Amino acid sequence: MLLFPIGVLTLLTTLLGIMYLDYVADPEKNLHDFPIALVNQDVGDTITTADKQQQVNFGNQITAALAQGIPADKVDLRVISINEAERQLQSGRIYGAIVIPSDFSKRLGILGVGSVIPGDIQRPIITLQTNPRAGTFGTQIVLRVGNEALTEVNTQVGKQLTDQVNAQLAPKPGAAPAPALSGATRVALADPIQVVTQQYHPLPHGTGQGLTAFFYALLLLLAGVVGAMVIHTMIDAQLGFVPTEYGPWYVHYPPTPISRIKTLLIKWGVLIVAANIVSAVFLVVGEVLDMPIDHPLALFLYSALAIIAVGVTGLSMLAAIGSAGLLVNLILFVILGLPSSGGTVPIEATPKYFGWLASFEPMHQVFLGVRSILYFDASSDAGLTRALWMTIFGLAVGLVFGAVITRYYDRKGLHRSNRARP
């Protein structure tokens, strides 16, 4: 009697510890397929070396250096156009972008000439764009990867530019020797690139730096799981299948002669009504707390659908296996769901099996839907379409599973009655 609950609790907490600690312990070590765009708009420039004109394109050189220097097993570096990069940023498909402007080579040439000719010059700029709507932790990874890679590129370009200027200053036969580069000039040439960090479509106030979508999705999931548990227990008590305790007293109504399928249909009906009320409550709370909600109707409808899908599946599990369904629901929706949601740590910065879990875990689908509505203007490309279809699919599975198993029990005469152990 004592060993069984201790064993169950030990196994449950072991799974809980592995899932929750494994996904946060070392995100940099687990980094894989992390999508960042690289946009090279540089049109090149013509320089004169030893009385010869030469076409150069430093943007192409930097693109090749970044593609070779950034580890391909960790980062999915996508060399794409500026329009495609913006489209992927707007849909949350990439966490950031490195943008080389069209006049990059020209500005580098001007910097080289300006090092020996008086005049005002500016360092060429490379923009490191982050996508805060895709997640705060993802932004930090973009900054780290981008700064490390561009620091190395800056060193290589600086050495090449210094050699180029020295070649231009090399004395020609019969001409007076050119003045040597000053120390300040050498420092400027050694560090020629200015990296500018820029947020793409910054989040407004009231979004918790991109965490409100995760916690809103978590509320919907908990509403479905807890709602299923509460409805299951309270209706069973009203129908006389379990006692209702009030401190030292309890009430146990006579069992109601009702089939399992009808009992489940009653629970589903109560859940559907409650889901719409809870969805409206969450929406009102968000408005009161000044959360930016540009699409309240979409958020209300999807929230109700998500609660219903989770709750229906949870009730079906309880109808199928009884009290053990509480543990199954806890494992399915919470223990496995939260770390694989991608709401705090990106899926690409967790062990790869979390990506497999995210392909079907309800929490990830709900998070994608809520994030799309709250941060990406309810864009279908930002995950709303996937979230809708996966939520509907989960609802269908829950409905079919619950209806089939309860009808089977009824047909076999497995009515809800007290099965005392001998």
Image (cartoon, rainbow, N blue to C red):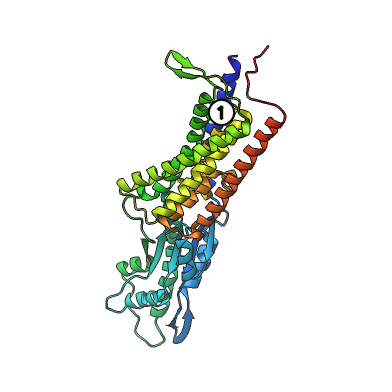
Quadrant housing the N terminus = top right
Q: Residue at x 46, y 57 (%)?
A: 95
Residue sitting farthest toward the top: 422
Can you say whether 223 is above or below 92 in the image? above
Looking at the image, residue 88 sits to the left or right of residue 411; the answer is left
Residue furthest front in the image:
257
Q: Quadrant of residue 97?
A: bottom left
Front-lying residue, 67 or 22:
22
Percent x, y of residue 243: 51, 19
User: Which of the 4 image quadrants contains residue 125?
Assistant: bottom left
Q: The disc labelled 1 sits on which kind of residue? A: Leu
Residue 55 percent coordinates (x, y):
48, 81
Q: Is residue 175 above or below residue 216?
A: below
Secondary structure of the residue carrying numbered label 1: helix
Say which residue appears at 53% left-offset and 41% top-offset. 310
Q: Residue farthest to the left? A: 119
- Percent position (x, y) of residue 208? 35, 47
Residue count near mark 1 (Cα–Cα under 10 Å), binned few <14, some 14–19, many ≥20? some
For residue 163, above or below residue 344: below
Residue at the image point whose x is 58% and y is 34% from the top: 264
When the figure is inspected, residue 162 is found, relative to residue 36, above or below; the finding is: below
In the image, 28 versus 411, the foreground residue is: 411
Question: Which quadrant of the rendered structure holds the C terminus?
Answer: top right
* Residue at the limit of the structure toward the right, as seen here: 412
Q: Nearer the viewer, residue 217 or 127?
A: 217
Q: Residue at x 43, y 69 (%)?
A: 100
Image spot of residue 395 (x, y percent): 57, 45
Can you identify the residue that label 1 sits on?
Answer: 12
For the residue pair 398 and 183, the one nearer the viewer reads as 398
